[in-house]
Image (tube, coloured by chain):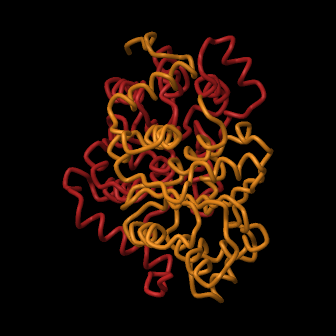
Chain colours: A red, B orange
C-alpha cells in the first residue's frame, strides 16, 4: 500500500483551499458578497460547482436570516440530518435547533392529514414558526405543507431555506416558494438538487461569517 | 397564493415514482441487480443522475456489506450527519451506529497526531474496526487516516464506504482506496461528489432490500 503522507491535515487550511478552488471555478457574479459566502459553502457541501447556477435568493434573504439568527431565532428543520449538520458552536445565540420528525404524535397526525410524516411534522412547529428560520433540506412535502399553511395566513417565519432534494416534487415545491413566498425571504436551489448537507451548510454560513 | 393540492402525499408512492424516474434516466447496466439498488438510492439522495457514473463497487462489496450488516456488524461513521441519516428501524440486527467525532478525547488526539479531528476520531474505532462497516461520507482525512492504518496492518473492516465529498483530498482519498483496498470490499464515488446523504442512503439500501 502506498503511503499517503502528502495529504493536507490542517482543517482550516483545507477549508481555505476548498473555498479558493470553488471561487476560482464558479461564477458567483450574480450574488452579493454575503450571498456568495453562502453559495460557496453550499457548493462545498455537495462537491459540485454546477449547483451554484441553481441557487437563488429572494426578499433580502441573507440580511434577514442573519439578523434572525443573531436575534436568537429557533431553526426548524425537516430532517435529523439537517439538524445534525448544523454546527451548534457557530450559532451566535444558542439558538434552538428543532426537528419534530420523530415526535411520537407524528405518525397519527400524518394518518389524519393523509400526508407524509415530514409534512405532518411541520404542523408541530405551530408555536415556534413566527420569526423562526425554516430549514427544509429533505422533503418536498414539508415545503408544500408549509406553503399551504402560509397561504392560509399561517405564522410567518423570518426566512425559509427551501432546499429539498429529489425527483418527485422537489423542483415543483421550490418553484412554488419562489413564485409566491408570501413576503418571506427565501433561499432555494432550483431543480432536483439540494439536500441536508447544502441546507446545513447555508445555516452554518449564516451563523457566522468566515471559516 | 396558489393551492398546492396536486402534489403526491403518499411516502411509499413518492419513493416508487422517484426510483422509477431514476431507473429510466440512469445507465445502470454496468451494475449487478444488487449494486443497482444501492446506486439508485444514492442518486435519489443527491438528486443528480450524473452521480451514477462515478459510483464504483469493488471486492464483492454488496454481498460482503449485506452479510456483515445482517450479522450485526457495527457501522462506524465519520460524521454525525451520516449517523443520523441511517434509518435505525431498517437495520436487521439492531446494529450499533457509532460516530466518535464528538468524543471528548478527539481534540487532544488531533493535536497530538497533527491531523484533523475527523482523522483523529478514526483512532477511536480501534476496538470495533475488525469486521465493521466503515461509512465515511464527509472527511477525506478520515479515509486517508484509515488507509494508512490498514496499510500498516491495522484491523480489517468487513467493507468500506469511501464517499467523502469536496475539493481537497476527496477525489485523491477515494482513488487511493480503490487503488489498494488491502483486500477490503469497497464502495466509492469517484471525484468530488459524495457526502453524508449518499453514504447514509447506501447503508439504508444495504440494510434491507426494497422500499
The residue positioned 57% from the left and 62% from the top of the image is A90
Residue A5, compared with residue A34, is above or below; it is: below
- Residue nearer the viewer, A155 or A125: A125
- In this orientation, does residue B170 appear? yes
The N terminus of chain B lies in quadrant: top left
Q: Quadrant of residue A37?
A: bottom left
- The image shows residue A29, relative to residue A195, as above or below, that is below
Numbered circles on residues, count = 0
Left or right of B59? Residue B47 is left
Depicted A24 relative to depicted A129: above or below: below
Q: Position of residue A193 (x, y in %)?
A: 38, 40
* Residue A141 screen position, x and y as percent: 51, 24
The C terminus of chain B: image quadrant: top right
Q: Residue at x 48, y 16 (%)?
A: B8
Q: Nearer the viewer, residue A180 or B199?
A: B199
The x, y position of residue A116, in whole percent, is 60, 21
Q: Is residue A102 left or right of residue A178?
A: right
**Toward which corner of the image does residue A103 lie, by quadrant?**
top right
Residue A179: quadrant of the picture: top left
Which residue sits at x=56%, y=81%? B148
Amino acid at each position: 500500500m502506498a503511503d499517503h503522507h502528502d495529504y493536507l491535515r490542517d482543517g482550516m487550511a483545507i477549508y481555505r483551499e476548498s473555498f479558493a478552488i470553488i471561487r476560482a471555478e464558479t461564477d458567483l457574479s450574480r450574488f452579493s458578497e454575503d450571498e456568495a459566502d453562502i453559495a460557496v459553502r453550499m457548493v462545498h457541501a455537495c462537491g459540485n460547482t454546477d449547483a451554484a447556477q441553481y441557487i437563488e435568493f429572494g426578499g433580502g434573504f441573507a440580511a434577514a436570516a442573519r439578523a434572525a439568527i443573531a436575534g436568537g431565532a429557533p431553526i426548524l428543520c425537516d430532517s435529523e440530518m439537517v439538524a445534525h449538520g448544523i454546527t451548534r458552536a457557530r450559532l451566535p445565540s444558542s439558538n434552538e435547533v428543532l426537528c419534530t420528525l420523530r415526535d411520537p404524535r407524528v405518525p397519527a397526525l400524518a394518518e389524519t392529514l393523509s400526508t407524509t410524516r415530514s409534512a405532518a411534522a411541520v404542523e408541530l412547529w405551530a408555536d415556534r414558526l413566527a420569526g423562526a428560520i425554516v430549514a427544509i433540506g429533505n422533503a418536498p412535502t414539508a415545503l408544500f405543507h408549509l406553503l399551504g399553511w402560509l397561504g392560509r395566513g399561517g405564522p410567518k417565519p423570518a426566512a425559509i431555506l427551501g432546499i429539498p432534494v429529489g425527483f418527485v416534487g422537489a423542483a415543483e415545491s421550490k418553484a412554488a416558494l419562489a413564485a409566491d413566498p408570501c413576503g418571506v425571504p427565501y433561499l432555494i436551489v432550483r431543480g432536483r438538487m439540494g439536500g441536508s448537507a447544502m441546507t446545513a451548510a447555508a445555516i452554518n454560513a449564516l451563523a457566522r461569517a468566515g471559516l
